[in-house]
Amino acid sequence: MEIDAVQLDAWTVVLLLLAGLCAGWVDAVVGGGGLIQLPALLLVPGISPVQALATNKLGSIVGTATSSVTYYRRVGPDLRTAGPMAVAALGGAVAGAALATLIPAELFKPVILAVLAGVLIFTLARPRLGEYDDLRWVGNGHRRIAAALGLLIGGYDGLLGPGTGTFLVISLVSVLGYSFLPASAIAKIVNFATNLGALIFFVPAGHVIWQLGLGLGAANLVGAYLGARMAVAKGSRFVRVVFVAVVAVLILRLGWDVASSYLNGR
């Protein structure tokens, strides 16, 4: 099958759908599904990096919509935090997506790697972090901090993407004081907004491969539904364990990319 010069055979389609299923599950539990789905898309012959990023957003938004609804029904996330954070994140994602065509992602990877390493050390050093809600700030102060975090992380999601849900969860836990389960619930609502923001730019620009993105969306839907239900059933401790595992894999993945770029540039 050929879609706008992108070559797809049956095995590639199957592997992409499996990647979408796994990405939906991981993203629903703790974020970071782009770590699985985006690299899989980049392996498709003929696809450009911007097409891969845009198509990844189409698949992911179906998964984040599914997990957002599931969490809303079963956890009841605080919309007074999620609302301002999501609106700011949407605006940041539109701006980030516009920059994605101009700025090489390699410039950001070493910085992101250092931040993730700090996040992992911080989380492991505080074993009770995110076990219980311990909210910081109140009223408008709480909402302003949430919006600022949404704007910053939304910009990153539009620009690069992988690990956005992970950054949202750790910011909600470490900065705002939520436990891991409600943090994941809020993060899904915000992540839906960041995906929407990126698509607001990518769709009119013609970067989305629709047939592929909708197929990934169906796989994400199944994975997200299963992941959100499992997270709700097992609670914050389970989400914390998955969070640590995903951050560790993100560090290994980005570390490999940075090392490979350095060695190839020598």
Image (cartoon, rainbow, N blue to C red):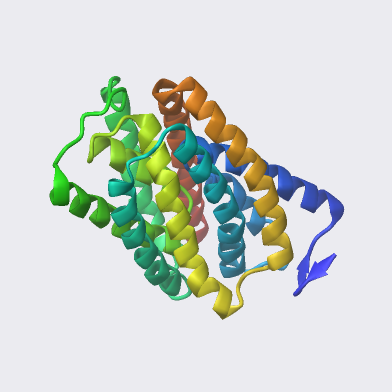
Name the outermost residue toward the bottom: 205
Asked if residue 20 shows in the view, the reply is: no
Residue in the image at 47% along x and 42% along y:
31
Q: In the displayed structure, does residue 221 sit left or right of residue 231?
A: right
Nearest to the observer: residue 239 or residue 253: 239
Nearest to the observer: residue 41 or residue 253: 41
In the rendered view of the protein, which quadrant contains the N terminus?
bottom right
Nearest to the observer: residue 153 or residue 195: 195
Q: Quadrant of residue 6?
A: bottom right
Q: In the displayed structure, does residue 20 sit left or right of residue 248?
A: right
Q: Quadrant of residue 98?
A: bottom left
In this view, 117 is above or below 196: above
Q: Position of residue 250 (x, y in %)?
A: 47, 41
Residue in the image at 53% along x and 50% along y:
65
Q: Quadrant of residue 23?
A: top right
In this view, 128 is above or below 180: above
Residue in the image at 40% along x and 45% along y:
187
Q: In the displayed structure, does residue 89 sit left or right of residue 3?
A: left
Q: Position of residue 121 (x, y in %)?
A: 30, 31
Total numbered labels: 0
Q: Position of residue 146 (x, y in %)?
A: 25, 50
Asked if residue 259 shows in the view, the reply is: yes
Residue in the image at 61% along x and 68% along y:
51
Q: In the displayed structure, does residue 175 sit left or right of residue 223?
A: left
Q: Position of residue 264 (x, y in %)?
A: 52, 58
